[in-house]
Image (tube, rainbow, N blue to C red):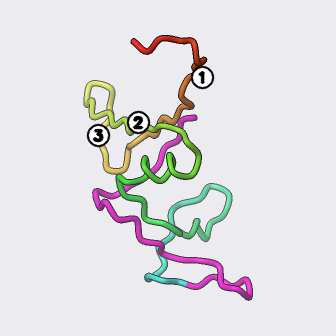
Amino acid sequence: MSSPCPSSTNTVHPSCARRAGDGHIEHLEPPVYHGNPINDSGSLVTVDWGFDICERIHAASGLFTHVIQIDDLSRGIRAEYIEVLISFKPAQTRAQDKIP
């Protein structure tokens, strides 16, 4: 699985909003909206991910995740929030397989 994911350099990932028991959105921080090509109102940021996202993905799914960041002006790539997450499932091993 690969996914772009804006993340901050914080190692803590504070929740910014959540759905309350009655269904309405409860803002835990002042609301922040990212651009959304489908909705001019934007998309509400619900979690401000930190670099601990790899640990959280592993805890939730068992997948290992690498964070890739490319900073290459020759390709026109230099910006904030350009991390791409690559998650993968570990290979299955059999009991008789030798560990190298």
Compared to residue 22, the image places residue 40 above or below, namely above
Q: Give SS at disc 2.
A: strand
State the predominant SS element of the stretch in magenta.
Answer: loop
In this view, the mark in front (2 or 3): 2
For the C terminus, the image quarter is: top left
The amino acid type, in three-letter code, at marker 1 is Gln
Q: CA distance from mark 2 to mark 3?
A: 19 Å
Residue 4 locus on image (x, y percent): 49, 43
Looking at the image, which residue is at 33% across and 26% down?
Answer: 75
Q: CA distance from mark 3 to mark 1?
A: 37 Å
Looking at the rendering, which quadrant does residue 73 occupy?
top left
The answer to whether mark 2 and mark 1 are in CB contact below 8 A is: no
Looking at the image, which residue is at 43% across and 47% down?
Answer: 54
* Disc nearer the start of the sequence (3/1): 3
* Disc nearer the start of the sequence (2/3): 2
Which of the two residues, 79 or 59, is positioned nearer the viewer here? 59
Residue 66, labelled with which disc? 2
In this view, the mark in front (3 or 1): 1
Q: Residue furthest bottom?
A: 22
Residue 14 locus on image (x, y percent): 41, 71
For the N terminus, the image quarter is: top right
The amino acid type, in three-letter code, at marker 2 is His
Looking at the image, which residue is at 53% across and 41% down?
Answer: 3
Residue 20 locus on image (x, y percent): 65, 84
Which residue position holds label 3?
Answer: 78
Magenta residues?
A: 1-26
